[in-house]
Each structure stands twice: as C-alpha cells, then as structure tokens.
Image (tube, grey):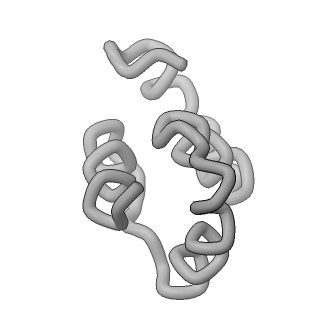
C-alpha cells in the first residue's frame, strides 16, 4: 500500500489527493493490509464525498 496507489484511485474518480493527516492515519493500517479500494472508499465516506462514491461504485474499480 503506497500513497501513490491510493492517490491514483482517488484521482481516477475525481476525488482529492490524500492529506498528510490522512496518510499518517493510513500508515497505521498497513499491518492489517487492507485493499486499496477499501481504503479509498473509506476516505470518500469520511470526507462525505457522495459524488465520488457514486463514481467509484460505477467505475471498473470494484471491491
């Protein structure tokens, strides 16, 4: 799990890049090895970005 990998998913559906605070939190999740898609969806939900969630669910990037 890399910051670039997560940023690529976020940007592909029109979301914003990770903030430093979000990245610091995600680094704590690394031992659990979550899928990048799960992390991205969680970020959209936390940000309240409903439009990005719809685009994410409609995209090829499925969980």
**Residue sitting nearer the eye, 6 or 32:** 32
**Residue sitting nearer the eye, 53 or 26:** 26
Q: Is residue 58 above or below residue 20?
A: above
Residue beneath the point at 34% across and 43% down: 9
Point out residue 29 in the picture as x, y percentages from the top left corner. Answer: 66, 62
Residue beneath the point at 66% across and 75% down: 25
- The quadrant of the picture occupied by the C terminus is top right
Q: Is residue 47 above or below residue 34?
A: below
Point out residue 10 in the picture as x, y percentages from the top left corner. Answer: 38, 49
Write down the quadrant of residue 7 in the picture: bottom left
Q: Is residue 60 above or below residue 27?
A: above
Point out residue 41 in the picture as x, y percentages from the top left corner. Answer: 60, 39
Q: Is residue 59 left or right of residue 37?
A: left
Residue beneath the point at 63% across and 37% down: 50
- Answer whether residue 52 is visible to the viewer in this image: no
Point out residue 48 in the picture as x, y percentages from the top left corner. Answer: 70, 51
- The quadrant of the picture occupied by the N terminus is bottom left
Q: Is residue 35 left or right of residue 4?
A: right
**Residue sitting nearer the eye, 33 or 25:** 33
**Residue sitting nearer the eye, 47 or 62:** 62
Write down the quadrant of residue 59 in the picture: top left
């Amino acid at each position: 799990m890399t910051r670039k990998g997560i940023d690529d998913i976020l940007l592909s559906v029109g979301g914003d890049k990770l903030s430093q605070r979000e990245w610091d939190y995600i680094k704590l999740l690394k031992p659990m090895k979550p899928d990048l898609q799960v992390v991205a969806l969680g970020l959209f939900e936390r940000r309240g970005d409903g439009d990005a969630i719809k685009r994410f669910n409609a995209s090829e990037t499925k969980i």
